[in-house]
Amino acid sequence: MQADDCAPIEIARLRRALERAHAREAVIEDGTGRPVQEAAVLVPLVLRDGGMTVLLTQRTDHLHHHPGQISFPGGRVEQGDGSPLAAALRETEEEIGLHPRHVEVIGRLPEYRTVTGFSITPLVGLVHPPFELELDSFEVAEAFEVPLDFLLEPGNRQRHRIEYEGVLREYFAMPWEGRFIWGATAGMLVSLADLLAIGEN
């Protein structure tokens, strides 16, 4: 099945929105100018009969970076990857067992720089069912899907503040069915929503 056979109007809207991402500046949480590590994530949009969903993971509690947080599959860009896209697809397969043959990458969101020193390239990909996941139990506690419409709705966002390294910082959060989607993951979803909203105005 090709992506354009499923919800063609919505997919075309996504493609147009992602074309606008190249003109957007990076989202920067950290303005200290410290060295950053290159990273890449896949923003997996699953093509379901009832509408698109976003595939998210919850990290295990013992990890050094962002333990227990909800995130997109992804990680650092390694020397052998060659590109952020290759890194995102490799990490996705390693973390949740989603083979690249199920993923059709259609664009990227603006670069996202975190307070923890990562410069993240978010690649947006359409995920074609059927597929099976095989989680890396060391890194991933669970994987789950959230309706894309819910995550794009501004009324479902919250703004919170946290003190980090002596500085009070704001971040987005999106509570969903007992889960707390926040930080960089929520910020990237807001970037996607903003790009889509530009096309509607």
Image (cartoon, rainbow, N blue to C red):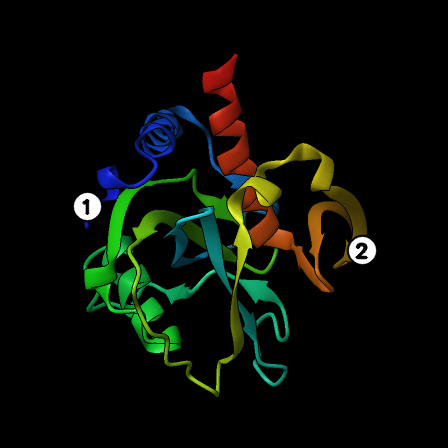
Q: Which residue is mark 1?
A: 2
On the picture, is 174 further left or further right than 79?
Answer: right
Q: Amino acid at mark 1?
A: Gln
| Number of numbered discs on residues | 2
Q: Amino acid at mark 2?
A: Glu
Q: Is the residue marked by circle 2 packed among few (<14), some (14-19), or many (20+) residues within 10 Å?
A: few
Residue at the (56%, 40%) spot, across then down: 149
- Depth check: 102 or 95 in front? 102
Judged from the image, the secondary structure of the residue bearing numbered disc 2 is strand
Mark toward the viewer: 1 or 2: 1
Q: Which residue is mark 2?
A: 163
Image spot of residue 91 (x, y percent) = 34, 69
Q: Is the residue marked by circle 1 packed among few (<14), some (14-19), or many (20+) residues within 10 Å?
A: few
- Residue 4 lies in quadrant: top left
The reply to whether residue 193 is in sight is: yes
Residue at the (73%, 35%) spot, across then down: 155
- Depth check: 129 or 161 in front? 129
Residue at the (54%, 33%) spot, across then down: 193
- Residue 180 lies in quadrant: bottom right
Residue at the (34%, 28%) spot, across then down: 9
Mark nearer the N terminus (1 vs 2): 1
Judged from the image, the secondary structure of the residue bearing numbered disc 1 is loop
On the picture, is 67 further left or further right than 42?
Answer: right
Above-or-below relation of 19 to 56: above
Image spot of residue 94 (x, y percent) = 33, 77
- Depth check: 81 or 106 in front? 106
- Residue 90 lies in quadrant: bottom left
Q: CA distance from mark 1 to mark 2?
A: 46 Å
Q: Which mark is residue 77?
A: none
On the picture, is 170 further left or further right than 198?
Answer: right
